[in-house]
Amino acid sequence: MNRTAAFTALGRALTAGARGGPSLGARLAALPRMMWATFTGRYDGGMRLALMAAATAYVASPIDLVPEAVLFLVGLIDDAVVVAWLAGAILAETERFIEWDARRRSVVPGHVV
């Protein structure tokens, strides 16, 4: 997923309440189901989850490409860009997963995983 799509998804998610999109709670509840469906091979989100995990590790890691200690503002900006991309990617992927899950459940009535 590219940056533009991530920021677009972030904007859509923040305004979803007015348009009836998935709530933040529904998205957070979908995360563990999405990860499990991916790990068991039922959902095709492997590469996207790997990129999100890498972005999380980058932000949480004390080792940055642009260290805050040397270039304070630039170091913070690179982290902010990664966090913004990560937020948008999570919002976009959880929306995609929720739609996939709803379609899957409608095809197999009563099937709950």
Image (cartoon, grey):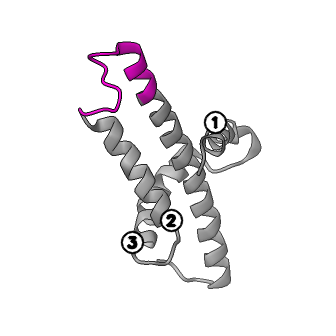
> Mark 2, residues whose alpha carbon is within 10 Å: few (<14), some, or many (≥20)?
some
First in sequence: mark 2 or mark 1? Answer: 1
Disc number placed over residue 14 in the picture, else none: 1
Secondary structure of residue under mark 1:
helix
Q: Quadrant of residue 63?
A: top left
Q: Residue at x 45, y 78 (%)?
A: 41
Read off the residue under disc 3. 39
Q: Is residue 72 magenta?
A: yes
Circle 1: residue type? Leu
Q: CA distance from mark 2 to mark 1?
A: 22 Å
The type of residue carrying mark 3 is Phe
Identify the residue at horizontal 45%, vertical 70% (top origin): 38
Q: How many residues crowd mark 3 within 10 Å: few (<14), some (14–19), many (20+)? A: some
User: Where's residue 81, x and y in %?
Assistant: 49, 31
Amino acid at circle 2: Gly
Residue that appears at 54% across and 83% down: 111
Compared with residue 43, is residue 54 higher up or lower down, i.e. above or below? above
Q: Position of residue 101 (x, y in %)?
A: 59, 70
Residue 86: x %, y % from top left: 48, 42
Q: Residue beneath label 2, please?
A: 45
